[in-house]
């Protein structure tokens, strides 16, 4: 009696591996977050906000940060002090809305850094105003 040794046929192994690679390449998605994650409110009627509930943060074209104080006064502020200033204003007025306004020519990086600082300070009501001409 002759014994046949068991063997696994490997002739089509390369074809199967190639088909599996093609399947995973086609069916796999790579999620990449791009842009800012902002939740915009629904379109509705404009609301009147009291002036004392608004804090205007100004970014100049040379990326300097200032706080706009009525009546028409810009108070320059070092970027490192922005978080503490906004936090103290939020503690004094929990209804505070922070409005960010930029001049044309301000870098996107500074704008994003200012938004990050506002969020780290605890600001949840942030308004983005149209850039200055």
Image (cartoon, rainbow, N blue to C red):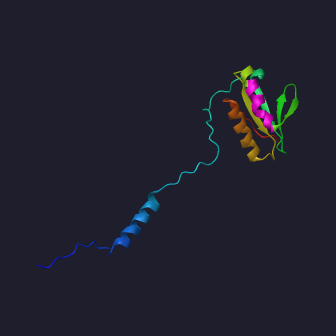
Q: Position of residue 6 (x, y in %)?
A: 23, 72
Q: Is residue 3 magenta?
A: no
Left or right of residue 22: residue 130: right
88 relative to 82, above or below: above
13 left or right of 67 in image? left
Residue 69 vs residue 79, the one in the foreground:
79
The reply to whether the magenta stretch includes residue 81 is yes
Q: Which residues are magenta?
A: 79-89
- Residue at 19% x, 76% y is 4
Q: Of all residues shown, which one is farthest toward the left?
A: 1
Q: Main secondary structure of the magenta part?
A: helix
Q: How many marks?
A: 0
Q: Residue at x 62, y 49 (%)?
A: 34
Residue at the image point whose x is 69% and y is 22% from the top: 95
Pick the front one: 82 or 71:
82
Q: Position of residue 1 (x, y in %)?
A: 11, 79
Q: Quadrant of residue 91?
A: top right
């Amino acid at each position: 009696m002759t014994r046949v040794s068991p063997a696994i046929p490997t002739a089509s192994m390369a074809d199967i591996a190639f088909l599996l690679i093609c399947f995973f390449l086609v069916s796999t998605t790579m999620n990449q977050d791009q842009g800012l994650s902002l939740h915009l409110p629904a379109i509705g009627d404009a609301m009147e906000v009291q002036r004392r509930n608004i804090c205007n943060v100004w970014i100049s074209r040379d990326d300097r940060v200032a706080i706009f104080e009525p009546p028409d006064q810009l108070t320059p502020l070092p970027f490192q002090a922005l978080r503490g200033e906004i936090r103290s204003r939020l503690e004094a007025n929990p209804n505070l809305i922070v409005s960010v306004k930029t001049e044309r020519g301000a870098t996107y990086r500074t704008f994003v850094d200012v938004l990050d600082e506002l969020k780290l300070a605890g600001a949840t009501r942030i308004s983005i105003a149209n850039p200055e001409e």
